[in-house]
Amino acid sequence: MSHISFIGLGNMGLPMAINLAKAGHNVTGFDLSDAALAEFAKYGTAAVSIPDAVCSAEIVVTMLPAGKHVRAVMAEVIATAPAGALLIDSSTIDVASARDVALYADRAGFAMLDAPVSGGVGGAAAGTLTFMVGGPDAAFAQAQPILAAMGKTIVHCGEAGAGQAAKICNNMILGISMIAVSEAFALADKLGLDHQKLFDVASKSSGQCWSLTSYCPAPGPVPTSPANRDWQPGFAVALMLKDLALSQEAATASGADTKLGAAATAFYEALVEQGHGGRDFSYAYRALSEAK
Ligand code: NAD
């Protein structure tokens, strides 16, 4: 069993850290929020600072909001963690920050992985997350049993930043496909076509995709989808916008042509401006079906 330091005990980090503790690891947690720390203290050791959290860590996991937080926290971790500790960042951040931080870590003698996740808060609590991992082979091999305590599917995507690249490419597909399915259901409404009939056809035809079959944005066909509970998240519009913005940042930096990604970003941006950032991202259908 390992000494693990977990920094960032938010909606995702807290259940992930709890699963590591339940798997028998010696977990020390740190967060700026006293409430998060108090909750974690029921399962592991609550630290008072980053140096306090990492001083005897063999592995440090971070789960933070964005690239600027990861840069700041990892700088402190690199300055205070024991030599040889493995650093794993599971936050969803920009590819450039992931590569920069991995480079600083490498120069200071630390192996580092970017290991963003999909599966949401439910997957974090159930220990069924998918990890997309970037970094050296040896570090990946060392991390695998740790990640397996928090997730079900673990894919080594390549060198530093490859995990973040896989995450934003996947979520760009998701953001676009949710709008495509939503437009189809909104059009079906105008044409007098029943939701269930469109679902029965498209789910068995070439229009089939996850946004349709697992997460149908129109009420009715998929009982578990947020559309049947007034589009409560789930995966919020604001989080989808964050990931799409990262995809567009990466597209601009790399010269990729992502016209539909850009259009999807503008679409979710408008939903946030209209006050729907806290709705599930499948609210796309509701917004489109209300459009004149
Ligand atoms: P969150 O805001 O609930 O948690 C982030 C935590 O980091 C907060 O508790 C905050 O206090 C803490 N924090 C910020 N700066 C810190 C610092 N300097 N030191 C210590 N703690 C600090 O966010 P979340 O929903 O848990 O998401 C975390 C990451 O996971 C994000 O990058 C997000 O994009 C990604 N993600 C979220 C979901 C989801 O469904 N929520 C799904 C997949 C990926």
Image (spheres, rainbow, N blue to C red):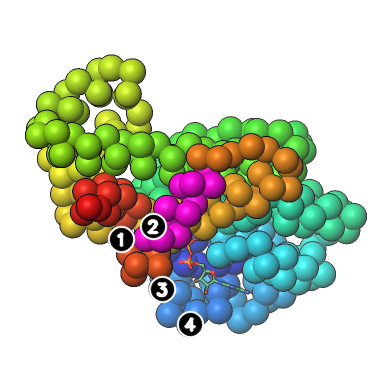
Residue of label 4: 34
Camera-nearest label, 3 or 4: 4
Q: Residues within 10 Å of mark 2 (few under 14, many from 20)?
A: many
Identify which amino acid the numbered label 1 is placed on: Arg
Q: Residue at x 16, y 49 (%)?
A: 228
Q: Residue at x 90, y 55 (%)?
A: 107
Quarter location, residue 28 = bottom right
Instruction: Give above or below for 6 relative to 221.
Output: below
Q: Which span is picked out in magenta?
A: 261-271
Percent position of residue 6, x then y? 58, 63
Q: Nearer the viewer, residue 136 or 284?
A: 284
Measure the alpha-carbon separation of dots 3 and 2: 27 Å
Instruction: Give above or below for 128 relative to 99.
Output: above
Quarter location, residue 57 = bottom right
**SS assignment at label 3:** helix
Q: Nearer the viewer, residue 241 or 60?
A: 241
Q: Residue furthest front?
A: 292
Disc on res. 39: 3
Percent position of residue 84, x then y? 81, 54
Disc on res. 279: 1
Camera-nearest label, 1 or 4: 1
Disc on res. 237: 2
Measure the alpha-carbon separation of dots 3 and 4: 9 Å
